[in-house]
Image: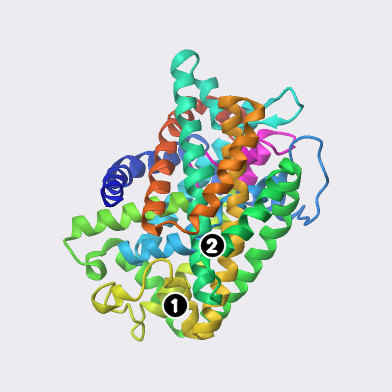
Amino acid sequence: MDNLLHFVQTVNSYLSDYVLVILLIGVGLWYSIKTNFVQVRCFGEGMKKVFGNLKLNGEKHESGMSSFQALATAIAAQVGTGNIVGASGAILTGGPGAIFWMWVIAFFGMATIYAEAVLAQKTRIKGEDGQIKGGPVYYITTAFKGGFGKFLAGFFAIAIILALGFFGCMVQSNSIGSTCSTAFGIPSWVMGAVLVAICGFIFLGGVQRLASVTEKIVPIMAAIFLLGGLAILIARIKYVPATFGMIFKYAFKPQAIIGGGFGAALKIALSQGAKRGLFSNEAGMGSTPHAHALANVAEPHDQGCVAMIGVFIDTFVVLTLNSLVIISTMYTPDGVLANGYMGAVVDTIGKANLAQTAFGTVFGAGFGNMFVAICLFFFAFSTILGWNLFGKINMQYLFGDKSYKIYTVIALVFIFLGTLASNDLVWELSDMFNQLMVIPNVIALFALTKMVQGCTKGLKADR
């Protein structure tokens, strides 16, 4: 197991330090320019489409989902342990400055996810059973005909099944098990059994049951977490200006907080921001297009605008709030990480319990642990629902519609095992396959630029 962990960590270091940063920033910058910064021009339009028709009990659809249900399913997948545990790991490893690079990745990622949603809408198909299907495998084979397209699509499908359907869900259930054990003393395996029972019921209900659950749980879980985070920031209000200052300072001077030379420290801060930013908002990864493909909208552009708001909510609202709580309580002069993540503190604080420790500084250790455990349960639970759907669509692409039963059984086994597995190895495996998904997805995004531009409102060519 140690050898496997070392191998996966080595692969991840090359992917995140070089390939991932170049691809994510590259494709985000490319689509920002090619769409005349659609994330800025159409931001207001996206907000109106999301919050102008906000419903917690949407209409039932014979096939697909409403636009809001698709967004809720996408956010359910985006807002998970990446926002709490992932952000904590990025801050510990790359310092507070890693959050700045997450913002950069997310800003350009809004243009990327716009393109993903547009392409998912344009290339989606209706199966023999009348159900809508869409996602990267369909726009990859649109971009590249013949054997090369089938190879890229197959590579992506296998990677996403492993990354999200199996190992990704292990990450989520692992975090649920560990935090609930810390907060409530509930054995991890018990939480695993409960998760399997609830998830199995929802999985077997199909897309409509999943959409009905996510459209209700996502707004509620976000509101609870935001209220708790705002309460912490109000209590620590005098440290908030310094908190923002640290994010910007250590983005360009990371060696002051994480040690080492300037070049090495900057690479760590940037790569952590890119890697955890990807795991958080998933822009460019090719996961959320599966949900956006199912939306019943008038034009692909409409769902593209909605998809951008998902990244904004995930990174600039939820992840940022959690990061501000951590930095304002742990890195301030009276915090235990004021001198960086070094010394005896390394033995007591890790990425799994950093958020609980941070909330506990104001709420008290007991209530802080419980608050984060409850939020993480809903975040991770909703992510499991979304990721299972994305893996299922690709399983059916590879092996036919009837394969979902076998896939569901295997996925439930992985969910249970996640509550028992090593946290580090699970995270590293999930990271590796997440990053491998990016490669074929981004190649197709570059190839289909003209298709996206043809659907984008406000471009000169459309006037």
**Identity of the residue drawn at 60% across and 70% down:** 374
Q: Nearer the viewer, residue 122 or 49?
A: 122
| Residue at the image point whose x is 50% and y is 78% from the top | 359
Residue 102 in view (yes/no): yes
Quadrant in which residue 405 is drawn? top right
Residue visible at 74% across and 30% down?
A: 131
Element at label 1: helix
Q: Is residue 294 above or below residue 44?
A: above
Closer-to-camera residue (379/181): 181
Left or right relative to 424: residue 151: right
> Which mark is first along the chain, 1 or 2?
2
Asked whether 290 falls inside the magenta stretch, the response is yes
The spot of residue 55 in percent (x, y) is 78, 55
On the image, the x and y values in percent for residue 108 come to 46, 46
Span shown in magenta = 282-307
Distance from Cα at disc 2 to Cα at disc 1: 24 Å
In this picture, is 189 found above or below 196?
Answer: below
Label drawn at residue 120:
none
Are there few (<14), some (14-19), or many (20+) residues within 10 Å of tag 1? many
Question: Does residue 240 appear to the left or right of 311 in the view shown?
Answer: left
- Assign a secondary structure to mark 2: helix
Q: Which residue is mark 2?
A: 189
Circle 1 sits on which residue? 357
Asked whether residue 119 is in view, the answer is: no
Looking at the rendered structure, the kind of residue marked 1 is Thr
Q: Look at the numbered discs 2 and 1 and tell me whether their residues touch, using CB distance below 8 Å.
A: no
Q: Residue at x 76, y 26 (%)?
A: 129
Q: Position of residue 272 (x, y in %)?
A: 35, 55
Nearest the camera: 282 or 102?
A: 282
Residue type at mark 2: give it.
Trp
Answer with the quarter of the image where residue 424 lies.
bottom left
